[in-house]
Amino acid sequence: MKELIQTSLEKAISYEDYRIVTAKLVSEEKTSGPNQTESLIFYTKLNNQRMNRLDKTLELSPEIIEKANAISCNLNWLVLTESWCGDAAQILPVLNKIAAASGKISMSLLFRDDNLELMDHFLTNGGRSIPKLIVVDQSSLEVKGAWGPRPKPAQDMFQVYKAKKDEIPFKDFQTELQTWYLKDKAKTIQEELLEFLDICQ
């Protein structure tokens, strides 16, 4: 596993570079990954707009800033994602702001479909759900934990949709999910990530 983590970290890109790549995809009317469908290209464009907004407006809670500043070891936050993923658009800006607030966290990203070997070590209920945050100790390359693909209330909503997807159109579920993210203002994500800021011991 350490070898795979090391290789993955070496080819991962910064959040800033990820944003440049996704903006380029939008300008070229493309999406990340092998499936260049109209709907995935549309979601890539929409997600780029969401991330632009969150990068500018998102504010962290005092509690998470305090915890981020108190980390006693250096961590790598390695995140698997894709440009078309609606959950990633809501979550990556939060992860980036926490990492930036800490000074002890180096965050980098990988496209899932180019890194399936790593993804398959961090499945959610057997699926390649993203985004997936992998918390790695910088010195030992030991995996200290993993989080994702979404906060628990949003995951619960997804499970309900999955059980009734013959009755609920995907677009309706997407609207409901994005409305939840808007109302929540990243509070739940921050609460759930607190435990990952206290794992150096």
Image (tube, helix red, strand yellow):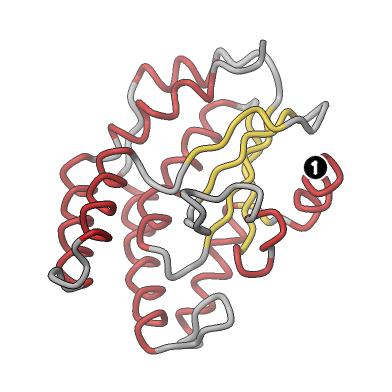
Q: Nearer the viewer, residue 26 or 198?
A: 198
Q: Which residue is mark 1?
A: 1
Q: Nearer the viewer, residue 30 or 161?
A: 161
Residue 145 placement, left or right of 136: left
Q: Could you tell me which residue is drawn at 83 percent across and 39 percent down?
A: 2
Q: Nearer the viewer, residue 197 or 14?
A: 197
Image quadrant assignment for residue 145? top right
Image quadrant in which the C terminus is located: top right
Residue 10, image x, y percentages:
81, 52
Residue 6, image x, y percentages:
83, 45
Q: Could you tell me which residue is drawn at 56 percent across and 36 percent down?
A: 146
**Label 1 Cα crowd, 10 Å radius (few <14 / some 14-19 / many 20+):** few
Residue 89, image x, y percentages:
39, 57
Q: How many marks?
A: 1
Q: Is residue 97 above or below residue 17?
A: above
Q: Is residue 127 above or below residue 37?
A: above
Q: Is residue 62 above or below residue 106?
A: above
Image quadrant in which the N terminus is located: top right
Point out the residue furthest to the right here: 3
Residue 36 placement, left or right of 111: left
Image quadrant assignment for residue 165? bottom left
Q: Is residue 112 above or below residue 148?
A: below
Image quadrant assignment for residue 73? top right
Residue 169 placement, left or right of 67: left
Residue 149, image x, y percentages:
44, 48
Q: Could you tell me which residue is drawn at 64 percent across and 58 percent down?
A: 110
Residue 24 placement, left or right of 86: right
**Circle 1: element type:** loop
Q: Amino acid at mark 1?
A: Met
